[in-house]
Image (cartoon, rainbow, N blue to C red):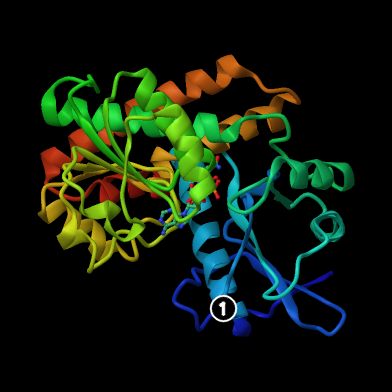
Amino acid sequence: MNIRELPQSAVDHLVEYNEHEAVYELYDKASLPLGFIAVHRKNVDVPSMGATRLWYYTNPTDALRDALRLSNLMTYKAAAAELPYGGAKGVLMMPAQGAIDRRQFFTNYATCVNELQGMFVTGTDVGLTADDLAVLVEYSPYMIGYGVDAAYYTSIGVLHGIQAALQYLDHTDELFYKRFALQGVGKTGLKLLQLLVEWGAREIIISDINDAAIEQARAIAPFARVVDPQLIHTQLVDVFCPCALGGILNTTTIPELRCRAVVGSANNQLICEEDALALFARGIVYIPDYIANAGGLLSVVSQYENKYHDVEQVVARLNRLQRRIEEIITQSSIHQIPTTMIAQNFVYA
Ligand code: NAD
């Protein structure tokens, strides 16, 4: 695997391009693309951060677009979480045929990341395991999150978002009588399920495209009802929690929602800003994804800044984030505009 910077002309025709700082292509011996690293914003003297995803893409352009979109989101996430870092993202394409030698693959990727000399700091997103991160850490000093349960802290932030939404809607953050629908019970969805159960939720509906994930969820919440993944967003619940991939909130699904709030860990839940307007018009409280799920970033950043995982610092920052979420909901209600428009002020402040 090799790395080269793409000229602006190779990316600026894509709608996801937003004056990115730099976009790099990862390619093989035959010069075929293996993935991309997009650096959206670079702040002085600090790196740009964003985890690395390994996923199935039908073509390299889709992977590039995902990298552009996700890196943009990371800039928002860092700003909303009051962190000084720029936003970036690594996106790797799962080879279409045959199993990959993961150790070799991630050793090569780590070497490419090293060529950016610390401008890009990364960790694990969808498709990467703790074992993959162990390899990355072995070969690159620019990998973070090893030994940190980022999914847990992500889910704590999502729980805070759920509680803030319920407090606004019902003047109580009590979960006992509330109904929840979880899309995706992977790393973050499973942790969120556990937290919902611990906080007293008893009416939970789940879906996943992976049967093994459903089995793990059943072990945590035997009472949870499992539905077809196509139908999870249509369930009559108080809170819909998207914890799988992006794009679940769109012109088709929003009219089908039967919830009062949407709060989840998935990145890029909305297809476009008009979707936030549509949610608002329906009276559904939407906690912007990059704020609801910033707990994972907060946890790995703590390790980066302190060289160890400072739990107290992470909890304090998560509590600040919760107050920010409450403020966003309040301001959205006062000014009668979507929460996404209020949240943008943190980035442009
Ligand atoms: P994961 O891969 O561990 O889990 C995702 C789960 O969703 C898997 O079980 C998968 O089978 C399932 N899934 C995929 N498509 C689905 C569909 N159409 N319907 C139902 N289930 C489906 O990933 P994760 O780490 O839990 O991340 C989930 C989302 O949260 C991603 O968008 C990720 O970018 C975001 N996120 C994760 C973290 C983190 O700490 N892991 C932090 C911030 C944001």
Q: Which residue is mark 1?
A: 58
* Residue depicted at 62% across the width and 54% down the height: 127
Task: Name the spot of residue 251 as percent of width and height, x first.
Answer: 23, 68
Total numbered labels: 1
> Residue 48 location in percent, x, y?
64, 50
**Residue 57 placement, left or right of 259:** right
Q: Residue at x 27, y 25 (%)?
A: 202
- Left or right: 161, with 129 as reference point: left
Front position in the image: 142 or 174: 174
Residue at position x 61%, y 55% in the image: 88
Q: Kindly tell me whether residue 81 is visible in this rendering.
A: no
Task: Kindly identify the residue that appears in the image at 45 percent across and 56 percent down.
Answer: 209
The quadrant of the image that shows the N terminus is bottom right
What type is the residue that disc 1 sits on? Thr
How busy is the neighbourhood of tag 1: few (under 14 within 10 Å), some, or many (20 plus)? Answer: few
Tell me the element at label 1.
Answer: loop
